[in-house]
Amino acid sequence: MATLTVHPDRLLPADPGVRDIARRLYAAVRELPIISPHGHVDPRILLDDTPFADPASLLIQPDHYVTRLLHAGGVQLDRLGVGEGPLTEDKAREVWRLLCTNWHLLRGTPVRYWFDSELAEIFGITQRPDAGNADDLYDRIAGQLAGEGHRPRALLERFGIEVLATTDDPADDLEVHAALAADPGIKARITPTFRPDRYLEPAAPGWAEAVKRLGAVAETEVGDYAGYVAALERRRRYFVDHGAVSADHSHTDTITTPLDRAEAERIYRWALAGQVSEAEATAFRRHMILEMARMSCDDGLVMTLHPGVRRNHHPDTLVRYGPDTGADIPLAVEYTDALRPLLGRYGTHPGFHLVLFTVDPDVFAREVAPLAGFYPSVYAGAPWWFLDNPALIRRYQESVSEIAGFGRMSGFIDDTRAFCSIPARHDMSRRLDAGFLAGLVAAHRLDEDEALDTITMLVTEQPRKVFKL
């Protein structure tokens, strides 16, 4: 039976001298608390604190990083329980066997790194999964999940999570967050995030109904454009009152082109009537991103942009299994001219923070880092989604530090709904930071005390500063 290799020097530089420096830097931050200012974990799991159902439901079914790799290798999504809801015992065991049998499909991916860390450090598994040991590993993990030490709150504390942000609909009553904030048993700060995408895309199915619901919860009449804007402003303030620190936006582009008031009002009326064209809807959304920036200047919510992804690229997968199942594919996105209207208005506004993410590694050096290197409001978001891997994290480190400096980075963002992968993801980032900084020390570009200050800052001070924690 093959051993699961979780080497203490994994991801650190191969050169012995540089590796020794990296070891010292990593050791200084390894046990520091986790600050996760952007992610998608369901906060209700922490409120209810119900034991996780089974290994497959926890580690495979909800994680599109995992399911997309298995699907690409020929495993149909229905065999993985995607879109099914709660799994039966037999189904969960079958899903787990599929992962173990196809473990080779994860080789060389960050998913493999995260899984190795999770299995070894959370569940004490030291055998590499395969078809022969799948049932044994399932039983061992399931037995631990039934115990007190592996319930959601126990793991939250064990992981050392200090801040955990969720992603929330503007119409959400945030009762779960209020209950968590009032619960003395929760030491971590659980913050909601304002995610208004569905309300800014008038051509999307169900937009008019969603806007009416938004108006109802905001207690604001949304029959005209002014009321619609007021409803968004009121809900943002509601989120701020419930601990939110950021508003997140994820559209296909970053273009911010203003409309005059009369045109915005006209498009809004036509959209409510179901008569808006795709071009008009896109123009309205691009205008509203400018409005979101204005609101961030007013209410203080950090503005984060996660653009450039064609959601649900495969139509049949969307119909059969729903969204967020791994069928999202990157698009090319331009930032410099697209954001010029927004930054021309608000780029030097005191207190405005804009965090730019990309799924195009070339954009770090070409656009994001130069923007962050001039505008005091702009920060370079950590590698996200398809870039969240060792090779491209190193490109980010080189691009941003060379052009804008470490102080213009966001700090690490895990951006996950896979709860148990959070510590593994942050550990990967800390090891890569240690290796990169060790290289600068070895090349006599930094003294080791400066590298130590920098890695500590990236793990603790920088995310607090950027996200106003």
Image (cartoon, grey):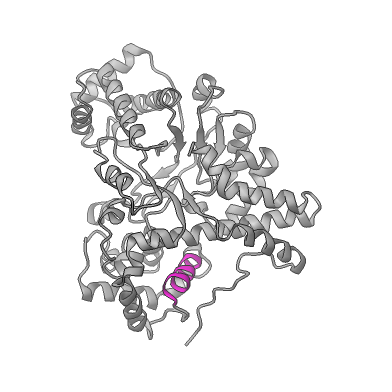
Nearer to the camera, 157 or 342: 157
Magenta region, main secondary structure: helix
Q: Residue at x 34, y 24 (%)?
A: 284
Residue 214 coordinates in the image, percent (x, y) = 23, 30
271 is higher (above) or lower (below) than 188: above
The answer to whether residue 410 shows anywhere in this view is no
Q: Which residues are magenta?
A: 112-124
Residue 261 coordinates in the image, percent (x, y) = 34, 13
Residue 31 coordinates in the image, percent (x, y) = 55, 60
Q: Residue furthest top?
A: 262
Number of disc labels: 0
Q: Residue furthest front?
A: 184
Asked where in the image residue 253 lies, by quadrant, the reply is: top left
Q: Residue at x 39, y 76 (%)?
A: 100
Judge whether residue 338 is colored magenta. no
237 is higher (above) or lower (below) than 91: above
Asked where in the image residue 316 lies, by quadrant, the reply is: bottom left
Q: Is residue 38 left or right of residue 62?
A: right
Q: Residue furthest bottom?
A: 1
Judge whether residue 120 is colored magenta. yes
The answer to whether residue 207 shows anywhere in this view is yes
Nearer to the camera, 255 or 186: 186
Residue 377 coordinates in the image, percent (x, y) = 55, 29
Q: Residue at x 65, y 64 (%)?
A: 12
